[in-house]
Amino acid sequence: MSAVVDHIYSREFNLSVENLSDILPAAHLFQIDDIVFKISLLMANNISSNTCFHYRELAQKYQLRRVIKKIHEFTVKNFKELSASEEFFNISQQEFSGYLSSDLIRIELQEIDVYTAAKRWLEVNQAQNPETVTETMRNVRFALIKPERLAQIKQDSVLCNNVECQGMIEEATEYQTNVYTQPLYDGVLNKPRGITGLVMFPSPSSDSEWQDIQLISYPEYRPFNWKTFPVTDVVPEYSWIDVVNVRNFLFVFGTGVESNNYQNFTRRYDASGDTWLDLTPIPRHPMLGVATAHHGQNIFLIGGLAMDIGEYVHAEATNVNDNYMYSIPSNTWMKCDNLPGKCYDSAAAHLDGYIYCNGGTVNNYTKCNKHYAYRIADGKWSAKSSMQFERSCHVLAALDKKLFAMGGTRQYFQDSIEMYDPLSEQWTCIQCETNNLEDAYISDIYNFHNSSSTSFVYNHKIYLVGAYNGGLIFEFHIDDDSKGVLDETRSGSSDRCNSDNSRCIACAFMTLPKLLASSQ
């Protein structure tokens, strides 16, 4: 109290971590906002395992929102350490559930820790009401717990008589059993905890060896710190690949070289468990330059350039118009209606029940502007209005009921963006404002490799990844005046990925527990 009185008369006082608990009540009582503000700053900057619980009590009592937010962030980040303390569980169910429901709990891939904490909160608070038990356990993502542990949890005294909790465990057990259908499950029980990030596959270097896979914490977390993980056992030593992200499962389709022979492969990455699964390879001649698109339970691989077995001779390779559909739940392939034209390095995208495929390279390296639509309901292709420009190795992305064909190559770089309206079946060139772009980078935005595998849509924007000079990321959207806006979201060589001299040939945007576990 005396410190506050001194401040009233002299505007000076001594504030420290040691005395803030004594000064805060008086400052709040006399409504001296500048002192309360300084105390909240001091508390927010000094949250630790030793002060967290005491500061949380003060912040809630005096409604210090800045401190409450910082404590929540600290608790989520240090969940496992703090949950070892008995004091941690002396909080309301609402607040406790707020922690358990966070995607950013740092548990290092161990969802069992979340279950253990939930069980401990129920025991400490002697919460035996079935509704309380159920509401608390809803925050546990049981599908991320290994089957053998699920069997033990099902017999746990806390849950054995709770019908709803037993149902959650049975649902999680079924999820774990049906391996192939896991990417089709749309629920909270299997949602991984982690940072939203970008997985990037840089192209092989000049000595025919793969660069390591790059993971980046983007776009919620800055700075953009690339984290590298070895590519070992992911793809063969030298491969052409396409990737498709289906509800946070990464499907990798490709043709690789082993023992001097080409062979097809299909692999699936489960981010929640950081594991890879071998799937049925596409049953056709090895090839590259394939267009990919995903809809519902199926993934389509269209066109490409067939290669000779044993040795790739570009001049003798053959364009194809194959259209294969991969069924996710059955892990099988089916040959579908062929694309009307033969080409490779085309681009494909799904929009409103159609798979659209356009552009690409035909015989003698000629680029084309053909545009086709595959109606999924009846499995038939039809020709649509051609693009205004020929392009190959470009991006085709769906955004707000429109298609956007971006960049690629013609004779040289293709420096245009076109928009397709399925209702009018017309293409329109989009004039773009280029904000925050250095002149040296502007040409880079128009040379992408491997079509739609190097782009993703997020928050009503199209992100273009890689480009000719390495790890650049560009952001495209349509503004309120129907004009295109193109920004480089990462500038300067220090912010690029580690493979500055390699192009990105495939990428995916997904939740990555591995990033969360390794972040500082």
Image (spheres, rainbow, N blue to C red):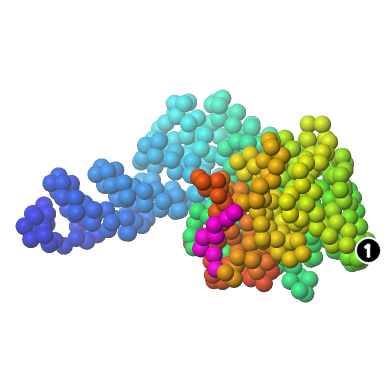
- Kindly identify the residue that appears in the image at 84 percent across and 53 percent down: 343
Residue hosting label 1:
316
Q: Is residue 131 visible?
A: yes
- Picture quarter containing residue 335? top right
Residue 322, how many percent across, how many down? Answer: 87, 47
Residue 248 vs residue 450: left or right? left
- Picture quarter containing residue 34? bottom left
Q: Is residue 516 visible?
A: no
Furthest residue in direction bottom, as rendered: 207
- Kindly identify the residue that appears in the image at 59 percent across and 71 percent down: 440
Residue 118, how many percent across, how many down? Answer: 48, 39
- Residue nearest the viewer, comparing 6 with 208: 208
Relative vertical location of residue 161 with respect to residue 193 in this rendering, above or below: above
Residue 130 vs residue 393: left or right? left
- Residue nearest the viewer, comparing 376 with 214: 376
- Kindly identify the residue that appears in the image at 74 percent across and 49 percent down: 387
Residue 398, how many percent across, how many down? Answer: 66, 44
Q: Secondary structure at mark 1?
A: helix
Residue 463, how many percent across, how many down? Answer: 60, 54
Asked if the stretch drawn in magenta spans residue 278, the answer is no
Residue type at mark 1: give it. Glu
- Residue nearest the viewer, comparing 397 with 504: 397
